Image: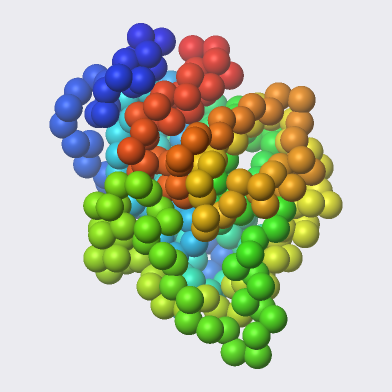
Amino acid sequence: LRSCFEMLARLDRVCWGGEMIEATDREVTGHSGKLAVRAWSGANPGWIALIAHGYGEHSGRYQWVAEQLVGARALVYAPDHLGHGRSPGERVYFEDAETIVADLESLRREVAAEHPELPVVLIGHSMGGMLAARYAQEHQQHLAAVVLSAPVLGTWHVLDLLEHDEIPDTPIDPGTLSRDPEVGAAYLADPLVWHGPFKRATLQAIDDCLLAINEGPTLDKPTLWVHGEDDELVPEADTRTGIDRIRGNEFHEHIYPGGRHELFNETNKAEVMADVLTFIARELNT
């Protein structure tokens, strides 16, 4: 297994093969109905990876990530949050982030009941990183480790939109996602990605969640924070103000020069994934 992690530093595909691993579909009963979940698996799994995606996107954008995790013997589960992707609800709308955190716990309970012997690692990106941090504060006993990718923590400039009487239509600039222009092009062309304006209730829910995280406990479970130095969508300096509130004794970070927001879609994504899997392997003692 360790040789597999080392190979990931050099390879851009799953280490035990070059073929795409097809996702299977399942559902989990969430706070507001059935949520769509993608699952990826391989032979002889040794742990469970739960992925919490970011605002406006969906779990299907994590195909490459899932392949790498499966190559490191993970069973991977990634829900589409309420109002996102193939899950029900008004698009990108929720009034309380705690309901999304509760949905993650519902999924964890379900898959843990199927595989009670396997440790669970939670991986959250962007808004999903915020959700993962809040989940970890509330359910640390269920996790072996946490990975936060460019998490929305501390302060977030997008919340300044709440100062307007009417939320202006300010779509996410695809150029902020990655130095690879194909990533932005695919993002724009993806029909499951939300390309419209932010919703006031959702922004308020995010603001409330950030305040709750700032006032909550530190993360006692091993935690890795990865962030791009040139992330304009969720600036590293803003996130650090929140990280400093929740940083526990087993906290690690990697800040990547030149990296933009989606490190798992960046030009150095193999390096990022190798760092993530090395961290997980160490914490799981595999």
Residue 150 visible from this viewpoint: yes
- Color style of the picture: rainbow
In the current view of this chain or complex, which residue is farthest to the bottom?
A: 165
Residue at screen point 74% across, 47% down: 241
Residue 103 visible from this viewpoint: no
Residue at screen point 17% across, 27% down: 18
Direction from residue 27 to residue 257 in the image, left or right: right
Q: Quadrant of residue 71?
A: top left
Image height check: is 102 above or below 265?
A: below
In the current view of this chain or complex, which residue is farthest to the left?
A: 19
Image height check: is 56 above or below 284?
A: below
Q: Quadrant of residue 144?
A: top right
Q: Quadrant of residue 147?
A: top right
Image height check: is 2 above or below 137?
A: above
Total of numbered circles in the picture? 0
Image height check: is 276 above or below 110?
A: above
| Nearer to the camera, 154 or 83 | 154
Residue at screen point 58% across, 19% down: 283
* Rendered location of residue 123, percent (x, y): 52, 40
- Quadrant for the N terminus in the image: top left
* Rendered location of residue 73, percent (x, y): 37, 23
* Rendered location of residue 260, percent (x, y): 45, 47
Residue at screen point 47% across, 49% down: 261
| Nearer to the camera, 153 or 109 | 153
* Rendered location of residue 104, percent (x, y): 55, 51
| Nearer to the camera, 252 or 146 | 252
Direction from residue 148 to residue 92 in the image, left or right: left
